Image (tube, helix red, strand yellow):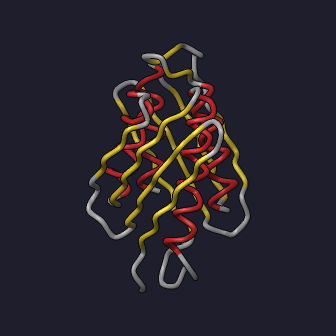
Amino acid sequence: MANRQATFKRKTKETNISLELNLDGSGQWEVNTSIKMFDHFLAQVARHGRFDLKISATGDDQHHLTEDVALCLGKALTQALGEKQGIVRMADASVPMDDALAMVAVDISGRGYAVLELSFSDNDMAGFATDLIRHFLESLAAEAKLNLHARILYGTNDHHKAEALFKALGRA
């Protein structure tokens, strides 16, 4: 397999993002989006996916920033995978987090599609709206051209449900 790394930059009127991805890393991360809860969730994807991730992102609002980070991560993933030689195309993971259980299945098929069952209470997690998680996952699936099925099976605490979901995404 070739060097499975990618660097991607995106600058628009709304956001300025720099992202580095190393699929053959060790789970190291350096993430700064100015949204602490989002940074925490992205760190879980890198840590549990065992790849290295650096993100520096600024933006005019959380919606644009979350969407554009997903787009950049999707493009970087596609770039790092290249011709997809030597990979297992499909995977899934179920992850518990205290009261919550989440499942994610992916197929790096070349066709972007997301099926999401996210049973959040729509509370605000330290300034990060739960609806942005749906938007992040849909944007990631579209740009990375992967089938992404994500489901929160149960849970009470939205933070625990979201964290289990992002850990499962990394593992899948």
Nearest the viewer among 4 and 20 is 20
Count of numbered circles in the view: 0
* Quadrant of residue 28 within the rendered picture: bottom left
Query: What residue is drawn where x is 65% and y is 53%?
Result: 141
The answer to whether 102 is drawn above or below residue 51 in the figure is: above
Pick the front one: 113 or 36? 36
The residue sitting at 47% across, 17% down in the picture is: 127
Q: Position of residue 50 (x, y in %)?
A: 32, 59
Residue drawn where x is 62% and y is 60% of the image:
144
Which quadrant of the figure contains the N terminus? bottom left
Residue at 54% in and 33% down: 59
Does residue 59 lie above or below 19 as drawn?
above
Q: Nearer the viewer, residue 161 or 142?
A: 142
State the residue lying farthest toward the front: 13
Could you say which quadrant of the image residue 40 lies in? top left
Residue 105 placed where, x, y %? 56, 54
Q: Position of residue 31 (x, y in %)?
A: 36, 43
Rendered view: 172 above or below 69: below
* Side of 117 where 26 appears, left or right: left
- Return the x and y of residue 81 as percentages of the image width and height: 52, 74
Q: Give the side of residue 43 with respect to residue 80, left or right.
A: left
Look at the picture and state if 137 lies above or below 86.
above
